[in-house]
């Protein structure tokens, strides 16, 4: 962790973040109790009509690719699971902030979610929805940076331009911590499960993930695919370097890629409309 007093002050400002949606905390508490039923959580979320409409819209969006329509929050909880719905509530709550914070970041995030979902599907993972959600949330630390430290983030963006380095490199120079660190603080604060927290923290250093290395490797690769393809904007114009460890762990062959891109493209096109 950073040592400079100035950096500590910045970290403190971020950690005081008052944006945790109350409902996410309530859901976290409810889910901790093993007796909680989907219907109970469903009732809680449904009390907020705007929120439940947003969650249902996302659950039914092209990139989840559900074969049947999800018509209630309770059904979403049964089909997608508690963690995925909690993540959807969370991302719906920050959705508007994200749209306002950095032009193109929301598009980058849903693109990465779609790519992560397709990769997880190709790898035959049973937790494809959760991996997709990790893709959606991966750069959430950037939203917090933009909201809490707008001047410093403007500096980071300026360094990207003048030195022609990535946002991640520029963060290290200006802030001494990155949106991955901020992502982890958020994930801890919100009690997000490890398979969401580790990709948020380590999608730029996938070899460091220990508890959810494959999910992290998938989000790492999804981020690269979506940057290379060009979809949205995440702060700089570079395609991040591919981690050999992550690539080898996933065991994908170059030839698998054609199928992956083939499946991804229609999802992106639908969302671009
Ligand atoms: Fe990132
Ligand atoms: Fe990203």
Image (cartoon, rainbow, N blue to C red):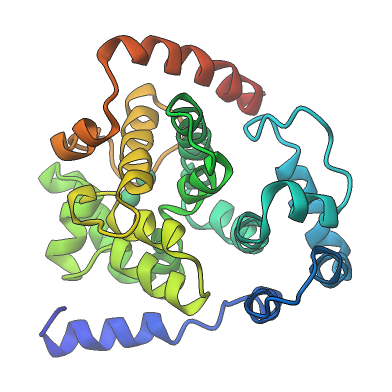
Name the image quarter holding the C terminus. Answer: top right
- Residue 5: image quadrant is bottom left
The picture places residue 250, in percent across and down from the top left corner, at: 29, 32
- Residue 142: image quadrant is bottom left
Name the image quarter holding the N terminus. Answer: bottom left
Q: Residue at x 54, y 48 (%)?
A: 130
Q: Residue at x 67, y 74 (%)?
A: 31
Q: Nearer the viewer, residue 157 or 202?
A: 202
Rendered view: 14 above or below 134: below
The picture places residue 21, in percent across and down from the top left corner, at: 64, 75
- Is 226 on the left or on the right of 247, as rendered? right
The picture places residue 246, in percent across and down from the top left corner, at: 22, 39
Rendered view: 189 above or below 175: below
Q: Nearer the viewer, residue 45 or 162?
A: 45
Q: Nearer the viewer, residue 56 or 93?
A: 56
Marks counted in the figure total 0
Rendered view: 5 above or below 271: below
Let me know if residue 140 appears in the view. Answer: no
Let me know if residue 198 appears in the view. Answer: yes
Q: Residue at x 12, y 63 (%)?
A: 173
- Is 126 on the left or on the right of 242, as rendered? right
């Amino acid at each position: 962790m950073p040592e400079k007093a100035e950096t500590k002050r910045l970290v403190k400002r971020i950690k005081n973040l008052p944006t945790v949606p109350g409902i996410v905390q309530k859901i976290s508490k409810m889910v901790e109790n093993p007796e909680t039923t989907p219907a109970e959580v469903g009732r809680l979320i449904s009390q907020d009509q705007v929120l439940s409409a947003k969650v249902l819209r996302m659950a039914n969006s092209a990139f989840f690719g559900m074969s049947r329509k999800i018509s209630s929050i309770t059904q979403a909880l049964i089909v997608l699971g508690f963690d995925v719905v909690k993540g959807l509530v969370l991302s719906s709550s920050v959705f508007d902030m994200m749209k306002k914070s950095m032009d193109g970041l929301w598009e980058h995030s849903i693109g990465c979610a779609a790519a992560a979902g397709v990769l997880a599907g190709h790898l035959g993972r049973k937790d494809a929805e959760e991996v997709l959600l990790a893709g959606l949330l991966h750069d959430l630390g950037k939203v917090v940076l933009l909201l809490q430290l707008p001047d410093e983030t403007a500096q980071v963006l300026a360094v990207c331009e003048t030195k022609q380095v990535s946002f991640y490199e520029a963060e290290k120079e200006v802030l001494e911590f990155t949106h991955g660190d901020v992502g982890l603080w958020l994930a801890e604060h919100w009690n997000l499960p490890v398979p969401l927290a580790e990709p948020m923290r380590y999608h730029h250093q996938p070899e460091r993930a220990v508890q959810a290395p494959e999910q992290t490797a998938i989000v790492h690769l999804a981020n690269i695919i979506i940057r290379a393809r060009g979809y949205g904007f995440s702060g700089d114009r570079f395609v991040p370097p591919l981690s050999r460890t992550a690539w080898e762990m996933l065991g994908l062959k170059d030839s698998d890629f054609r199928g992956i891109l083939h499946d991804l493209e229609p999802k992106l096109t639908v969302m671009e409309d």
